[in-house]
């Protein structure tokens, strides 16, 4: 270690060497302190993540309920049959006929009440061009599959949703896609 500066035997070289040793020790302490701090922060974050994982194991039912809620509330949410009568003056008989003829997108809840997604209508209340054509092509009673088709991005459509393309006026492109996939039942 450092000798007294008054020690005549100590050379400048020895002092320099002693200073470098002290600097190395100080850097090592600082590096160790930073490492320990980072380890504590990481351990705390891992503990928090593990708490979350232990509290909420994966539940297929909850995942399904979340997906249904997303579909039901997408792009403006639903209109009830009463809303359809009030807003668009469509009677229950007209709505029934349109459902049977695959001319309107709808779903039923657990009480068998019917709901109609707002996204299928324009600002003026008309159907978005192309939706009825696609419903006729699919001719499906699987209401959730129909909704997933319109609301899910499709690779063949440039990772865009069919609904977005229909709104943008590209109905022929979406109708061609629907025809191709209806024939293969891969929609």
Image: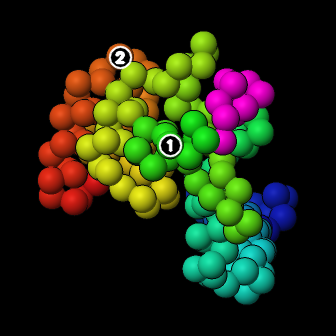
Rendering coords of residue 42 (x, y %): 70, 71
| Residue appearing at x 60%, y 19% in the figure | 125
Residue 90 inside the magenta-drawn segment:
yes
The answer to whether 40 is drawn above or below residue 112 in the figure is below
**Colour scheme of this structure image?**
rainbow
Placement of the C terminus among the 4 image quadrants = bottom left
- The residue where tag 2 is placed is 169
- Report how far apart the C-alphas of labels 1 and 2 lie in the structure: 27 Å
Which residue extends farthest top?
A: 124
Q: Quadrant of residue 69?
A: bottom right
Residue 146 appears left or right of 81: left
Visible in this render: residue 139?
A: yes
Q: Which residues are magenta?
A: 84-92
| Residue appearing at x 67%, y 84% in the figure | 57
- The residue where tag 1 is placed is 97
* N-term mark: 1 or 2: 1
Q: Secondary structure at mark 1?
A: helix
Rendering coords of residue 33 (x, y %): 76, 69
Residue 26 inside the magenta-drawn segment:
no
Q: Which of the two marks, 1 or 2, is nearer to us in this view? A: 1
Q: Quadrant of residue 112?
A: bottom right
Rendering coords of residue 18 (x, y %): 67, 65
Characterize the local packing of mark 1: few (<14), some (14-19) or many (20 or more) Cα atoms within 10 angstroms.
Answer: few
Rendering coords of residue 161 (x, y %): 40, 38
């Amino acid at each position: 270690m450092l000798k007294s500066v008054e020690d005549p035997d100590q050379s400048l070289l020895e002092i320099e060497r002693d200073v470098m040793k002290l600097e190395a020790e100080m850097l090592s302490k600082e590096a160790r302190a930073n490492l320990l701090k980072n380890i504590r922060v990481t351990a705390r974050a891992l503990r928090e993540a593990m708490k979350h994982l232990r509290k909420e194991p994966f539940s297929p039912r909850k995942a399904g309920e979340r997906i249904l809620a997303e579909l039901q509330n997408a792009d403006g949410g639903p209109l009830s049959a009463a809303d359809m009568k009030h807003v668009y003056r469509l009677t229950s008989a007209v709505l029934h006929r349109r459902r049977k003829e695959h001319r309107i997108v709808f779903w039923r809840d657990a009480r068998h009440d019917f709901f109609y997604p707002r996204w299928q209508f324009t600002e003026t209340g008309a159907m978005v061009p192309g939706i009825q054509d696609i419903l006729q092509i699919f001719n499906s009673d699987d209401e959730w599959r129909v909704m997933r088709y319109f609301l899910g991005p499709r690779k063949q459509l440039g990772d865009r949703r069919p609904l977005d393309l229909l709104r943008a006026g590209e109905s022929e492109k979406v109708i061609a896609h629907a025809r191709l996939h209806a024939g293969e039942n891969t929609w």
